């Protein structure tokens, strides 16, 4: 590990049966030795609490700690994540192992921080969970009459007499119930984490941070809520088919950076290949290197690899590793070693240039894309067309905007938007009154808001708004949606932005104010059409800013034109103009004017970037232009401070 320039290792996240081989009997000697050995080689440690894999003695003696799936089947031992997230007994055991670990390592100077559990995932539908859901609903609604009213339970005779009658499901139920179940699951994961956070905090130095590792677009819970109780965000970055989608990966980093609106960790990356895809092809040579620097460019303060060495047996024998079962390096090791060497070189060069630590510098964006768990849930419960993919919408906007703005934040629809010149809100389906008010204030103060199709349809209870889309924003827009349509064939669109089409979703719009402009119109059709000549996008200046509603899912070309237009409205310029397509430029700055640029050629053929004036930190030379071979990386400290 030291030879590979590794400075941190994560351990312990599934090692419960080794840490506590029998109830109340703890064995940490092996972990003491591992931490000491790592320290001897200048490697810091992140400790994982092992609660994603309870030991057999625990679940066989206390089967009530095992999770029950939606169809009523209780989990068995032998896989992982088989615990019930509500079980009070499980929480007692979890708090105890976390507390024993923290008592032992909470003040160990070689322990940097904690990862609680591992990839929180599966909720339980056991009796305790049902009981707690009913109590949660009771607290939320106060009376059953209020719940009946807001859920419109008279429909299909769903009317409840008391909270205990309410079914507990995550599918085929009233949309309000489904949305509340997701919120309950979120709150339950929060309290699940808090249980261990309290145990650690009571025994650990404040400098040791606490996180958990998440799975990018996973919609199992609201990641913004969960991260309120965590110190930093961390995620696991995998491309199971071995093909890096650099644009998508960029969006995923920005999504994770948005959880706490600060730098994050990549807790796991694949060394070559995984073992859980359809075809577990390996990333080609050089792409692991490319991914590591891309992570740093988007605000990662650490990049870790899962896993170091193959376990001889167990479910993940085929997974990529840095060492083979014989304990010697496999080919990808050399690439990871190069990454480590480069991180070291860049850190040293920056320190010499008076920059301080790269971890004090972050990406700073003037453009944001909003992400709303309420909205993705609401749409996924009732997609109306299987082709409408919320994440696809967010990333369609991202793919068009990121190359132009070069830095983009993906943040919660509830985030403070003061710093942004332009905000995109794809499919902001659930629009609570408070959010509508904040967005209106944002526009009034000079912001440029672009809403995507399906926005402003639902209220906080997943009920239809009593006014047409975009609901409480219709007045500011000076227009509304007349009707929405799922499409089974493309519909042409034309207008000031150019020509293109929509093939997933189309909403016909109507302007209601003389100051509302039609930005795009549905084009002519051969046969009868709901669309021909009807507005597809409206825009209106409002206060000091503008509000735009795009009622269609746009094809790539039109989306790119929309992005150019919107960024122009907000006077957003790229950090460096003229960066060729396929080359990504990322900036981290520290608020004192110091900046670092990371440039990556994501394509296969070489490219030249002009207009660069600075020091190439990997070669130590002054540069005014950079030549990048396919998949190559440059790290530049620009001469001018900003
Ligand atoms: C992650 C998980 C790791 C390992 C890895 C394999 O989801 O956290 O423990 O299973 O996948 O790719």
Image (spheres, rainbow, N blue to C red):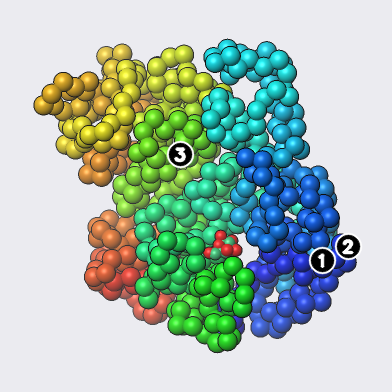
Secondary element at image label 2: loop
In-front residue for pair 42/137? 137
Secondary element at image label 1: loop
Quadrant including the N terminus: bottom right
Q: Please tell me which residue is depicted at 32% across the width and 29% down the height of the picture.
A: 486
Query: How far is disc 1 from disc 3 in space, using C-alphas?
Result: 44 Å
Residue 273 visible in this rendered orientation of the protein: yes
Q: Please tell me which residue is depicted at 33% across the width and 70% down the height of the picture.
A: 631
Q: Quadrant of ligand 1?
A: bottom right
Task: Report x, y in % for residue 225.
Answer: 62, 41
Which residue was labeled with disc 2?
A: 24
First in residue order: circle 2 vs circle 3? 2
Secondary element at image label 3: strand
Look at the numbered discs 2 and 1 and tell me whether their residues touch, using CB distance below 8 Å.
yes
Query: How far is disc 2 from disc 3 in space, using C-alphas?
Result: 46 Å
Which residue was labeled with disc 1?
A: 20
Q: Please tell me which residue is depicted at 58% across the width and 19% down the height of the picture.
A: 151
Which residue was labeled with disc 3?
A: 370
Task: Report x, y in % for residue 483.
Answer: 32, 19
Q: How many marks?
A: 3
Tell me: residue 468, above or below residue 360.
Answer: above
């Amino acid at each position: 590990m030291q030879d590979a320039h590794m400075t941190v290792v994560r351990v312990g996240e599934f090692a419960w049966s080794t840490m506590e081989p029998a109830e109340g009997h703890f064995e940490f000697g092996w972990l003491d030795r591992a931490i000491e050995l790592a320290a001897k080689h200048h490697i810091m440690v992140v400790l994982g609490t092992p609660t994603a894999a309870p030991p057999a003695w625990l679940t066989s003696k206390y089967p009530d700690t095992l999770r029950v799936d939606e169809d009523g089947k209780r989990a068995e031992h032998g896989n992982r994540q088989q615990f019930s997230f509500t079980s009070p007994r499980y929480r007692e055991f979890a708090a105890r192992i976390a507390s024993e670990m923290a008592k032992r390592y909470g003040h160990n100077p070689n322990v940097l921080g904690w990862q609680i559990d591992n990839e929180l995932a599966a909720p339980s539908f056991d009796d305790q969970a049902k009981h707690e859901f009913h109590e949660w609903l009771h607290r939320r609604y106060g009376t059953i009459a209020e719940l009946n009213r807001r859920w419109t339970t008279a429909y299909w005779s769903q009317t409840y007499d008391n909270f205990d009658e309410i079914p507990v499901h995550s599918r085929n139920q009233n949309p309000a119930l489904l949305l509340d179940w997701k919120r309950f699951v979120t709150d339950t994961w929060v309290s699940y984490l808090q249980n261990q956070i309290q145990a650690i905090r009571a025994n650990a130095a404040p400098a040791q941070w606490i996180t958990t590792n998440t799975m990018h677009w996973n919609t199992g819970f609201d990641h913004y809520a969960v991260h309120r109780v965590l110190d930093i965000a961390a995620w696991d970055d995998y491309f199971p088919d071995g093909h890096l989608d650099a644009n998508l990966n960029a969006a995923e980093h920005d999504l994770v950076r948005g959880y706490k609106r600060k730098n994050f960790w990549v807790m796991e990356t694949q060394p070559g290949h995984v073992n859980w895809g359809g075809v577990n092809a390996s990333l080609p040579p050089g792409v692991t290197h490319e991914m590591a620097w891309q992570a740093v460019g988007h605000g990662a303060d650490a990049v870790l690899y899962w896993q170091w060495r193959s376990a001889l047996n167990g479910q993940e024998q085929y997974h990529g590793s840095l060492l083979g079962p014989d304990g010697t390096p496999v080919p990808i090791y050399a690439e990871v070693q190069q990454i480590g060497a480069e991180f070291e070189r860049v850190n040293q060069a920056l320190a010499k240039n008076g920059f301080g630590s790269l971890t004090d510098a972050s990406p700073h964006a003037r453009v944001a894309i909003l992400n709303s768990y309420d909205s993705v849930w609401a749409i996924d419960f009732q997609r109306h067309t299987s082709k409408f993919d919320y994440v696809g919408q967010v990333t369609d906007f991202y793919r068009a905007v990121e190359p132009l703005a070069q830095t983009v934040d993906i943040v919660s629809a509830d985030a403070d938007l003061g710093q942004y010149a332009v905000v995109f809100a794809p499919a902001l389906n659930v629009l609570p009154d408070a959010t509508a008010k904040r967005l209106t204030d944002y526009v009034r103060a000079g912001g440029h808001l672009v809403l995507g199709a399906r926005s402003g349809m639902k209220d906080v209870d997943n009920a239809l708004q009593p006014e047409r889309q975009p609901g409480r924003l219709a007045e500011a827009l000076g227009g509304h949606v007349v009707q929405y349509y799922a499409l089974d064939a493309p519909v042409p669109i034309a207008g000031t932005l150019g020509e293109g089409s929509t093939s997933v979703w189309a909403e016909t719009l109507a302007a209601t104010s003389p100051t509302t402009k039609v930005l795009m119109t549905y084009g002519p059709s051969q046969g009868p059409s709901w669309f021909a000549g009807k507005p597809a996008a409206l825009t209106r200046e409002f206060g000091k800013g503008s509000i735009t509603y795009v009622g269609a899912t746009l094809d790539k070309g039109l989306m790119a034109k929309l992005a150019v237009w919107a960024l122009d409205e907000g006077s957003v310029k790229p950090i460096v103009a003229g960066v060729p397509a396929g080359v990504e430029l990322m900036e981290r700055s520290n608020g004192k004017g110091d900046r670092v640029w990371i440039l990556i050629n994501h394509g296969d053929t070489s490219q030249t970037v002009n207009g660069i004036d600075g020091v190439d930190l990997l070669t130590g030379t002054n540069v005014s232009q950079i030549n990048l071979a396919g998949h190559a990386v440059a790290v530049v400290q620009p001469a001018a401070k900003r």
